[in-house]
Amino acid sequence: MQRRAFLQCLVGFSAAAMLLPLRALAAIWNKAAFESKDVPGALEGLDVPSEIPSDEIDIMAPQRAENGAVVQVEIRSRIPSTEAIAIIAEKNPTPLIANFVFSNGAEPFVITRIKMAETSNIQAIVKSGDKYYVAKRMVEVLENGCN
Amino acid sequence: MANDMKMRAQLKGDIAEIKILMSHPMETGRRRNQLDELVPAHFIQLVSVTLNGKPVLEAQWSTGISKNPYLTFHVKGAKVGDKVEVTWHDNSGKSSTHQDLVIQA
């Protein structure tokens, strides 16, 4: 192969390889849900028609968080066939924080650290089949962690 | 990008406890720097974890995940030596991948 043709081929391939995943990723990320500024909008973006309150979802979080920049939350669903857990901080500028989808033996359980703007409920939304369940837990936040 | 992720996958019974610490600023787009300029949003949007090549966790995130994200989750039916691979992608098109093996706790 001519060197120039090879280089052109290489450049073309690299450009395609860089562009394609970006476009694919932009399509995967749920922009409508994550950029929504209120909880109803976030739930609509997640295609949640209605949520059933459940005491089969455990949310562990501090009662008081000194610094809203780092609030550790632990969520476990005991609802059979849980497929996904979404985390919402009700009064954040964009309330939907994360959506975790479990498969191939992963348990419906997650620990992570979130930002909270002010004192509010944390909601855990659990998807099981075509039903959605919710549990809430209040966290008092002393310093805004959403800047 | 060798040191931007730390992972430990420990087998406890037949459950692998997978802990991941990522290095990322997770900028909200609302913070101002010393020059009073808004720092653009820069955050991880997608995280995927596989065990021996099979997806076990797929996460989508907003800027509401804390700086230097931390994650723990559990996979049932794992064995010592299973390969765990984590990949994240952020909103600027960067990505990072890290691999480790499940060890006995």
Image (tube, coloured by chain):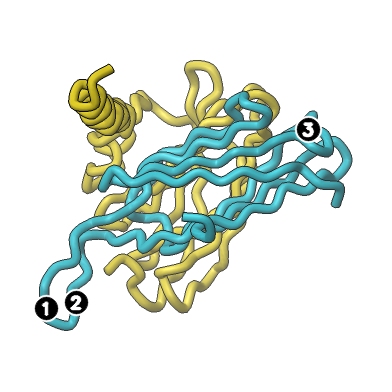
Chain colours: A yellow, B cyan
Which residue carries the number 1 mark? B36
Local packing at callout 2 (Cα closer than 10 Å; few below 14, some 14-19, many 20+) is: few
Residue drawn at x 76%, y 42% as measured from the top left: B102
Disc 1 marks which amino acid?
A: Asp
Q: In terms of image quadrants, where is residue A50? A: top left
Q: CA distance from mark 2 to mark 1?
A: 5 Å
Residue B25 seen in render: yes
Q: CA distance from mark 1 to mark 3?
A: 50 Å
Which residue carries the number 3 mark? B78
Nearer to me, B50 or A10: A10
Residue B43 point in image, percent of width and height: 33, 53
Nearer to me, A140 or B72: B72
User: Does label 2 or label 3 sit earlier along the sequence?
Assistant: 2
Q: In terms of image quadrants, where is residue B88? A: top left
Which residue carries the number 2 mark? B33
Q: Secondary structure at mark 3?
A: loop
Name the image quarter holding the C terminus of chain A. bottom left
